[in-house]
Each structure stands twice: as C-alpha cells, then as structure tokens.
C-alpha cells in the first residue's frame, strides 16, 4: 500500500504538528508528513519539523503583503513539489482563497478549537465562557471558502468546569485537539472517511473503526524516526528552514519582542514623569 502523504501548514507553536509527528513514529500509522510549511519564519513549529527530519519550508506571507495571489501561487508551487494527498492546517493563520482551495479540491482540512458551528473565528475559549456554554471542544473540518464553515469530520468535547478560565479551557481543549487530529487523519488515510465535493462521506466500517480507536490506550506509540529528505530551493521567499536558520530567526524574534517591551516600558515611564512634572 502506498503511504498517504500529508503536508502540515503552520504559523506558530506547532503543538498539533508535534502530535502528528509523534503519531507518525508508530509503524501502524497510515500516513507520513512529507512537508511542513510555515508562512512565518519565526514559527516555533518549524524547529519541531527540523528536529524530526521533516522538510520544513517557509513561504513568508510578510513578503507578499497585499499580494495574496502571489503568496498562494508560491504556496501551491511549494506544496506541489511534495505531491501530498492531504493538506492539514494546524494553527495556520491565513484565510485561503476559493482558487487555492479548488486547486486542492477536497484535500484541505483544519482543526478548530470549538464545537463548530459554535464559535467560529478567534478567542473561542473566552467566548464559550462568556456565552455560558456547558460544553466545549474541538472540530476537525473540511476547509471551504467560508471561514470555519466546512463539514465536520470529527469532534471531541468536554464539560466546562465552574472554575474554568480561558487558559485552563484552552489547555484541556488542546489535549483533545491532539487526539482528534491524529484520529481524523488516520480515518481519512484508511478511507474510512472520504471528502467528495466538500462533503464528508463515512464508510460502513467507520463507526466500528472510531469505537476501536477510542478504546486504544493513549500512549502505545512505538518510536521510529522519519526519513530525512533533502530539498533545495532557490527562491528568496520560499525556502527550506535549516536548524540554524530556525534558531536564528526565533532568537531574532525574541530579541525584537524584548526590545519592544523595553521600549513600551520606557515610554510609559517618560510619560508618567512628564505628567508628574506638569501637575
Ligand atoms: C490550535 O488551537 C488550533 O485549533 C488553532 O490554532 C491552534 C494552533 O495551536 N487553529 P498549535 O500551533 O498546533 O499549538
């Protein structure tokens, strides 16, 4: 059987990516990550990919500011090199155009931190608490042009506790996300779930499959290192992230945020001082 190849698109921390990397270490996991693409050079998730020996590419969206078509053309070109079966968005903070999605028709999925259709968009945990929701969770869904609107592939939920804060809720939902994304991708790779014309079709064996999966102990994964592949790319805005480059850009980013914080503190101090002198 041919390995089911996925691309993971990120913009930041990459904890869902890490859950997928860990799942792929198990010899019985039916998919492999062929490439990780970030639109931000400073994304911490790039380091996770490099460490796992997975090709990590950067298509820098800041370079394409005001030129979404150019950004997506570069993203398409990058993804096509790896001939992936499925594109998994994992904290990828760009809205993809209908043109991009029709290029990869029925091959783009996303993980969202709410029980869709509730709480599309950002700040889902705070909004769930404000709304007095009793349950919250995460959804893996098909990506369509409407934000967080595609059909649901899999959801996992939890009960909101009386003393939950947005942070405590985020932490518990994130754990569910990691399980949900791995299960959804396994189901798609094994064809228990297929996506046709943006609709989710479940096979007759799907329910039995999900029941079996949820009974499995969580940490029975065997360790296997993924293959390391070399890819060269000469474009200035689309390039492989080396370990050094990732570290360098993350250090620069940390340095920049520290500088911005000091500048803000200094400005506040000066303003307070001026106010003190005036009054
Ligand atoms: C997750 O909560 C995911 O649902 C949302 O963005 C967050 C990404 O987290 N789309 P991480 O980068 O995978 O840690």
Image: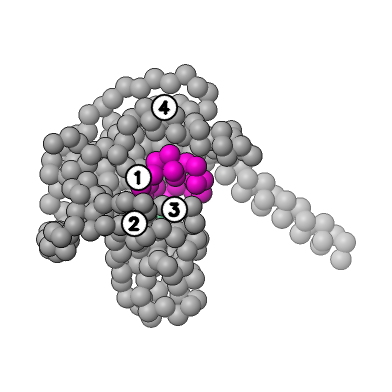
**Sooner in the amino-acid sequence: mark 4 or mark 2:** 2
- Residue shown at 22%/46% (left/top)? 189
Separation of residues labelled 1 and 2 (CA atoms): 11 Å
Tell me if label 2 and label 3 are in contact, CB under 8 Å: no
Separation of residues labelled 1 and 3 (CA atoms): 10 Å
Crowd rating for badge 3 (residues with CA inside 10 Å; few <14, some 14–19, many 20+)? many
Quadrant of residue 229 within the rendered picture? top left
Label of residue 107 in the image: 1
Crowd rating for badge 1 (residues with CA inside 10 Å; few <14, some 14–19, many 20+)? many
**Sooner in the amino-acid sequence: mark 1 or mark 3:** 1
- Residue shown at 19%/36% (left/top)? 3
Q: Which residues are drawn in magenta?
A: 89-109
**Sooner in the amino-acid sequence: mark 4 or mark 1:** 1
Q: Secondary structure at mark 1?
A: loop
Question: Which circle, 1 or 2, is nearer the viewer?
Answer: 2
Q: Which residue is mark 2?
A: 199
Q: Is residue 147 left or right of residue 163?
A: right
Label of residue 240 in the image: 4
48 in the magenta segment: no
Q: Is residue 198 above or below residue 169?
A: above
Crowd rating for badge 2 (residues with CA inside 10 Å; few <14, some 14–19, many 20+)? some
Crowd rating for badge 4 (residues with CA inside 10 Å; few <14, some 14–19, many 20+)? many
93 in the magenta segment: yes
Q: Is residue 78 left or right of residue 186?
A: right
- Residue shown at 38%/67% (left/top)? 115
Tell me if label 4 and label 2 are in contact, CB under 8 Å: no
Label of residue 144 in the image: 3
Q: Position of residue 180 (x, y in %)?
A: 27, 58
Q: Secondary structure at mark 3?
A: loop
Q: Position of residue 245 (x, y in %)?
A: 44, 28
């Amino acid at each position: 059987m041919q390995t089911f190849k996925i691309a993971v698109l990120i913009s930041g921390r990459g904890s869902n990516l890490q859950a997928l990397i860990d799942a792929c270490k198990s010899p019985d996991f039916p998919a492999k990550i062929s490439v990780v693409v970030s639109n931000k050079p400073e994304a911490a998730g790039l380091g996770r990919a490099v460490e796992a020996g997975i090709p990590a590419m950067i298509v820098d969206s800041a370079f394409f500011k005001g030129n979404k078509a150019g950004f997506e053309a570069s993203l398409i070109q990058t993804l096509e090199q790896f001939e992936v079966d499925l594109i998994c968005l994992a904290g990828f903070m760009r809205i993809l155009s209908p043109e991009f999605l029709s290029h990869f028709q029925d091959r783009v999925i996303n993980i969202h931190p709410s029980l869709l259709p509730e709480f599309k968009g950002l700040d889902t945990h705070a909004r769930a608490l404000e709304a007095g929701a009793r349950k919250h969770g995460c959804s893996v869904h098909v990506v369509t042009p409407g934000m967080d609107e595609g059909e649901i592939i899999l959801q996992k939920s939890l009960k909101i506790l009386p003393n939950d804060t947005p942070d405590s809720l985020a932490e518990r939902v994130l754990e569910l996300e990691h399980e949900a994304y791995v299960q959804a991708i396994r189901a798609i790779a094994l064809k228990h779930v297929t996506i046709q014309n943006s609709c989710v079709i479940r096979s007759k064996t799907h329910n039995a499959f999900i029941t079996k999966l949820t009974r499995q102990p969580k940490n029975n994964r065997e360790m296997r290192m993924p293959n390391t592949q070399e890819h060269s790319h000469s474009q200035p805005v689309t390039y492989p992230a080396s370990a050094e480059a990732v570290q360098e850009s993350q250090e620069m980013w940390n340095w920049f945020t520290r500088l911005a914080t000091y500048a803000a503190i200094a400005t506040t101090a000066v303003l307070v001082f001026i106010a003190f002198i005036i009054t």
